[in-house]
Image: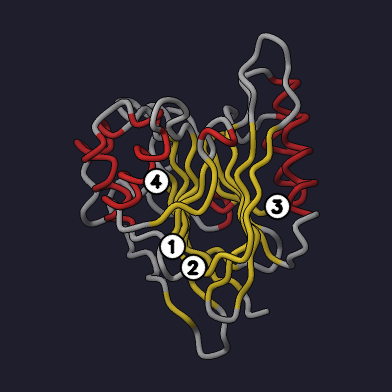
Amino acid sequence: MPPLPNSRTEPDGSAVIRVLTYNIRSMRDDTAALARVIRACEPDLVLVQEAPRFFRWRKKLARLARAADLVIVTGGATTTGPAILSSLRAGVERTEDILLPPTPGLHRRGFATAVVRFAGTRIGVLSCHLSLQKDERHEQGGMLLDRLAGMGVEHAIAGGDLNERPDGRTFRLLTEQLTDCRAAAPWGGEHTWTPADPYQRIDAIFATKGIEVLGCGVPDGLPGVTGTDLRAATDHLPVLAALRIPAG
């Protein structure tokens, strides 16, 4: 597997960043393995799904962030699961936790969002975990696009557990306006569920037009990321992308 570009600031003020999206199953598995996987990916941003939501959830998420050399930006129980972590390289301009309209009988969903700066760049960030129910999921896909468009930034990224494959209606809705980073620049592995026998891609990172995708996929061959840790950490595989954000 070719190396993924490292984070850096270009002479023109643009920024190369690493973005990771990861469903961590409420940290109910091997949290030491989870932290090792995240740390080995050296991300600037981590878009988390299924962050802890109940008793002492902030302390649990803070413990993971600290073990992975990151800090909490926003989200968790306040969004019913999605969260954003970052390295100290990111300057956080603002955050907003959003609860989506509830559907009786289904788990309520939410978005964790932020506007952050890297060197001369400014980007919107959104972490999501879409519904298991196809019609609600499609509505949430439209809400995701509306939220990105309303963040007041030229460039934005979104990522998460879509609960849908690339040929699904909601996935296709998102790719009508956003770049599917894995499809644009395949790197690493493709399938994200399940770790023991991955057979489908239901986790993804998307970027608005103008963001250059340098590589994206499951980091199963990255130095420091072992198959043992990937299987022990949670019930999803992570997706890692290297992106070049133009200077603002």
Q: Amino acid at mark 2?
A: Ala
Location of mark 2 (residue): 90
Residue 202 appears in the rendering = no
**Picture residue at 51% right of the left edge, 38% below the top:** 76
Residue 150 appears in the rendering = yes
Label 4, secondary structure: give it.
loop
Residue 27 position in % (x across, y down): 34, 31
Tags 4 and 1 in contact by the CB under 8 Å rule? no
Location of mark 3 (residue): 178
Location of mark 1 (residue): 44
Dot 1 surroundings within 10 Å: few (below 14), some, or many (20 or more)? many
> Within the image, what quadrant is residue 223 found in?
bottom left
Residue at the extreme bottom: 11
Mark nearer the viewer, 2 or 4? 2
Tags 1 and 2 in contact by the CB under 8 Å rule? yes
Tags 2 and 4 in contact by the CB under 8 Å rule? no
Location of mark 4 (residue): 218
Establish if 128 lies above or below 113.
Answer: above
Mark nearer the viewer, 3 or 1? 1
* Left or right of 185, for residue 149: right
The tag earlier along the polypeptide, 2 or 4, is 2
Q: Amino acid at mark 3?
A: Leu
Residue at the extreme front: 56
Dot 3 surroundings within 10 Å: few (below 14), some, or many (20 or more)? some
Label 3, secondary structure: give it.
loop
How far is mark 3 from mark 4, CA to CA?
20 Å
